Amino acid sequence: MTEPPSTPPTIGVFDSGFGGLTVLRALIARAPQARYSFIGDTARLPYGSKSRRTIARYAAQSARFLVEEQGADYLVIACNTASALALDAIQDAVSVPVLGVIEPGATAARAASTTGDVLVIATDATVQSHAYKASCAAQNLRAFEKACPLLVPLVEEGWINHHVTDAVVRIYLGELTSDAAASGMSADTLVLGCTHYPLLRPLIERAAPRGITVIDSAESTADAAVALLNGPATSADPVNELTQALTMDLDPSPEPFIKCFATDSVEKFERLGSRFLGRPTGKVQLVDLGG
């Protein structure tokens, strides 16, 4: 029998900011034995105001940093804007498997929906790209998208359970469900199309109409990433080597190996990042990726 790798795989996770730490949090819960390197391109956010060409250049630089300097074996693009506008450029820039957040969210919606009608809330840039609508259409789903620009600043302000945030969520979802119904849709699934939104999931679930299933794209992406890591079993190799590496019984509650990098504002990253990650980020290292 083939011996499992002596060193678990390194998963590189990229975001334009630190919202993607919700994806990292979900990954750690599913594959605690993996090693993780996360970079937030905080010097150049928000990506949504940039051109597709510029976003592709920025994202490719972060991807190469994770692969060439941190030794990432796999990349998870925990940024909806980069996943929507630059996934091909990232895949061209590196030689390792690359996974975005949009397709896994659409796949999870397909599994959850019985009506075939899906609601999506996201940032302006993600909605304007119509990436979720296209990915849902590829799964024979109809998607109705709505931009919710106030939610990200409310999350970053720490108003996770604030009555103002609750009111804003209810207004957005009321408008969304009303507009979708007026378009003849019978939506039964709601996709959270921004990595900040999982922190608002309890508010969103309370505000959503009865019968709506909420899809957390961070969790869906983590599920897809672990499936990619594990790979298909074969008769000759019924237990994939990476599966063995990720589930080695070295410690019943292992402390995950995490390195975090940012291109600016490391103090803010450390302060807010722990809220998204659900644990201290540790010392965030400042890196310069160039222009």
Image (cartoon, grey):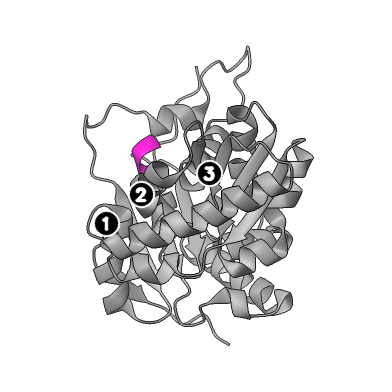
Q: Label 2, on which residue?
A: 203
Residue furthest top in the image: 235
Nearest the eye: 185 or 256: 185
Magenta stretch, main secondary structure, is helix
Q: CA distance from mark 2 to mark 1?
A: 7 Å
CB within 8 Å, label 2 to label 1:
yes
* 240 w.r.t. 158: above or below: above
Q: Label 3, on which residue?
A: 221
Q: Label 1, on which residue?
A: 161
Q: Measuring 55% from the left and 43% from the top, which residue is drawn there?
A: 190
Q: CA distance from mark 3 to mark 1?
A: 25 Å
Q: Which mark is residue 139?
A: none
Q: CA distance from mark 2 to mark 3?
A: 21 Å
Task: Read off the magenta span.
Answer: 27-31
Say which amino acid is labelled 3. Answer: Thr
* 103 w.r.t. 69: above or below: above
Rendering quarter of residue 129:
bottom right
